[in-house]
Image: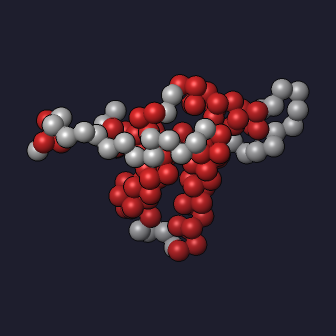
């Protein structure tokens, strides 16, 4: 009850810890119907997205993620998907997975 009334501090998990929580608690229902190989590939896409964020920014607490961090990530994917005057070097899907993963995790963890 204390958590509901705001008497307990919100968790301040690092983004890598939030991904673990995402896999174990948030999307467990989606994973249960997948074969082991499907689960492995499904998780790998999301892990890669978080790894890109960590490589670009750092493995920081989610409450410390800034607009500048998000813009850095956006620019990274935009440059790979639609470079100025060049050929795309990445498909669109990983960028989408990044935002879906973060949005769902933040919505669940921080009730936003």
Rendered image quadrant of residue 53:
top right
Q: Find residue 104 and report its horizontal and vertical position in percent.
A: 42, 43
Q: Find residue 58 and report its horizontal and vertical position in percent.
A: 58, 42
- 13 or 18, nearer to the observer: 13
Q: Quadrant of the N terminus?
A: top left
Q: Is residue 64 left or right of residue 4?
A: right
Rendered image quadrant of residue 88:
top right
Q: How many marks?
A: 0
Q: Is residue 102 left or right of residue 87?
A: left
Query: Is residue 4 in view from this perspective?
Result: no
Identify the residue at the far left of this view: 1
Query: Is residue 65 in view from this perspective?
Result: yes
- 12 or 94, nearer to the observer: 12
- 4 or 98, nearer to the observer: 4
Q: Is residue 69 left or right of residue 86?
A: left
Q: Find residue 3 and report its horizontal and vertical position in percent.
A: 18, 42
Colour convention: secondary structure
What residue is shown at x 44% (from left), y 41% (from top)?
61
Q: Find residue 27 and report its horizontal and vertical position in percent.
A: 40, 56
- 111 or 7, nearer to the observer: 7
What residue is shown at x 83% (from left), y 26% (from top)?
84
In this rendering, is residue 69 above or below 95? above
Q: Quadrant of the C terminus?
A: top left
What residue is shown at x 33% (from left), y 38% (from top)?
110
What residue is shown at x 59% (from left), y 45% (from top)?
54
């Amino acid at each position: 009850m204390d958590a509901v009334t705001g008497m307990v501090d919100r968790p301040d998990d690092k983004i890598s810890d939030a991904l673990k929580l995402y896999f174990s608690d948030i999307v467990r229902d989606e994973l249960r119907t997948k074969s082991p190989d499907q689960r492995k590939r499904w998780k790998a896409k999301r892990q890669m997205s978080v790894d890109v964020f960590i490589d670009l920014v750092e493995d920081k607490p989610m409450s410390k993620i800034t607009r500048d961090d998000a813009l850095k990530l956006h620019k990274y994917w935009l440059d790979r998907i639609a470079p100025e005057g060049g050929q795309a070097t990445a498909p669109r899907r990983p960028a989408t997975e990044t935002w879906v993963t973060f949005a769902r995790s933040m919505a669940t963890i921080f009730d936003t």
